[in-house]
Amino acid sequence: MRLKAKAPARAKALHFLPGFQPSGAQHWPTPHDLYSALLNKEFVLYYQPELELATHRIVGVEALIRWRHPQRGAVNPAQFIPLAEECGLILDIGRWGLGEACRQMRIWNSMDPSLNRLRVCVNLSAREFAKEDICDHIEELLRVHELDAMQLGVEVTETSLMTNLSTAVNVLSRLRQMGVALLMDDFGTGYSSLNYLEAFNFDVLKIDRSFVSRMAAGNNAQKIVRVIIELARVLNMEVIAEGIETMEQYKLLARLGCRYGQGFLLARPMPAEDVTRLLQLPGKILPESSFDRRTEGLREIA
Ligand code: C2E
Ligand code: MG
Ligand code: MG
């Protein structure tokens, strides 16, 4: 693959970004590969619908990045986000992702005025909110795309908060003042979860998939899920269960009072055009017949 003339200088400069230690043995991908993917527009956003469990109504979507590599096909974020974080390119990739998600949200808004209550949630890495200028960037995106701030959500994990606590406090409180929704992602898997819940005002707790997947009637995972739902209720937060793959998990969660969920059973991450089709269903309600009951034990192929 050939890069445009400017790329090599920038790729070289990547090694000077704070915190990046180039390792001796270069594995695929390299920072250079990531930079060229950005230049060549090989990244795309997929969107996974988030549903109200009782009604199957789509209330939001989570933007999930994919790399469409010309030779290797679809590359999942686990294969490149850690490197992008390490070398600093996550700042450029993240900015692209935020812009793309807002641009898409505006398209959905223009399709149907009732869609202006839909929320698009974007995952943020620690490095992205290490600089307070992310708030100005988001403010500008909301203005340019004429979005209500409540239509945008940012997902952060406990681990990413830990990395840069003092800036995170400032960034998240400013985003909150702006009206952007704050989601605590993968809840229950990091350290000191409760400290973070006390320090930050999250709007939403996302119950990590690991609890949901181990859940069965009466077992410990189910009891933990029940307590997380109760915790969210007491703290006035919404709760979204991640990774719902089976009807059993879906029913258990609904019975425990979990209001929202996402997972392969309900809808997989998909290109924007496919979400557009789902948003045109009456009431944005997915019929139960569309649930994918074969997902048990399967892993994502998108
Ligand atoms: P996440 O934010 O916790 O996203 C949920 C992950 O679970 C997604 O994996 C999604 O495809 C997967 N998933 C959803 N439902 C199910 C299910 O029922 N079963 C199973 N087995 N998996 C399910 P994905 O897209 O590979 O993303 C992995 C992680 O990469 C994300 O975890 C997030 O931390 C990160 N990521 C994805 N997109 C971005 C991005 O644009 N920026 C940043 N900074 N990180 C991103
Ligand atoms: Mg997430
Ligand atoms: Mg998650």
Image (cartoon, rainbow, N blue to C red):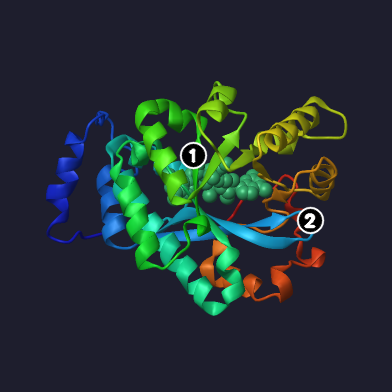
In the figure, is residue 235 to the left or right of 193? right
Query: Which residue is the extreme one toward the bottom?
Result: 111
Is 152 situated above or below 130?
A: below
Kind of residue indicated by mark 2: Arg
Residue 108 placed where, x, y %? Answer: 52, 72
In this orientation, does residue 42 appear? Answer: no
Front: mark 2 or 1: 1
Residue 223 placed where, x, y %? Answer: 80, 28
Kind of residue indicated by mark 1: Val
Q: Which mark is residue 156?
A: 1
State the residue in front, 40 or 72. 40
Q: What residue sits 76% from the left and 44% below the top?
A: 258
Q: Secondary structure at mark 1?
A: strand
Which comes before the other along the chain, label 2 or label 1?
1
Q: How many marks?
A: 2
Residue 197 placed where, x, y %? Answer: 57, 29
